[in-house]
Image (tube, rainbow, N blue to C red):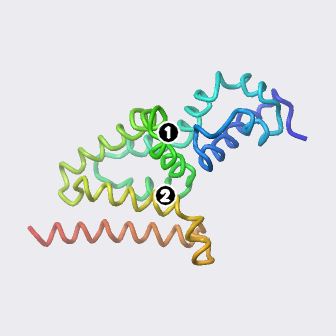
Amino acid sequence: MGKPENSPGTREQILSAAEDLFARQGYQATTIKQVAAEVAIQGPAIYKHFDGKRALFEEVLERLFGPFLALVNADTRSGDNLGAIVGQHLANPNASRIVQHATLSGGEDLALLVERWYLPFFNDVKTMAAEDTRFSPVTVIAFHAMLLGYLTLAPLHEAIFDFDPLSDNALGELLELQTSLVAQLGATANSGD
């Protein structure tokens, strides 16, 4: 039996359940009834915590993407937070899955992600790229796609390679690979001087 509907942990349980469902099946396919079932409460109880499914989705996004913006805003345009930003992605694979679903479905889901989360992040990245020739739009897109693709395709690759691509060791190797690629870009840029 679940916690009482008004217990302090219920709101967090709802957010976690909604995040997992949005990541697995997307915003459009997820229902309030499914979220409630995951938390073992009645559907209407969710409305004690959230105004509706859209408000729930927005709060899930805030919980997932707020830390990314905090890292970007803390950076002094040096790019020193790149490892922390990649680490944040790796620690939260649901973020990549939600982005994938929103990208594929388009519409309001994608507009919300772009306007609220991605434009602020990529505006800073675009400014950095203008100052650092290693990071053209194509390079930034490729790194972003590599990271999101790795995370969203993890279940496929786990079935193929019979190993967990989201294990701490695998994620550490991915972070080392991305860091190495950035260092190689720096070496290539400096050798042209």
In percent of width and height, residue 133 lies at 17, 57
The image quadrant where one finds the C terminus is bottom left
Q: Is 105 placed above or below 86 here?
A: above
36 vs 19, left or right, is right
Residue type of the residue flagged with mark 1: Gly
Q: How many marks?
A: 2
Residue type of the residue flagged with mark 2: Gly
* Residue drawn 58% across the image and 28% down it: 54
Q: Is 59 placed above or below 181 here?
A: above
Q: Which residue is mark 1?
A: 66
Q: Is 132 placed above or below 112 here?
A: below
Q: Quadrant of residue 147?
A: bottom left
160 vs 184, left or right, is right
Q: Quadrant of residue 115?
A: top left
* Residue drawn 24% across the image and 57% down it: 135
- Residue found farthest to the bottom: 161
* Residue drawn 45% across the image and 34% down it: 107
Between 163 and 68, the one lying in front of the other is 163
27 vs 189, left or right, is right
Q: Which mark is residue 87?
A: 2
- Residue found farthest to the left: 193
In percent of width and height, residue 30 lies at 65, 39
User: Could you give the CA–CA distance between mark 1 and mark 2, rounded to whole angstroms?
Assistant: 14 Å
In percent of width and height, residue 95 lies at 53, 48
Q: Earlier in the sequence, mark 1 or mark 2?
A: 1
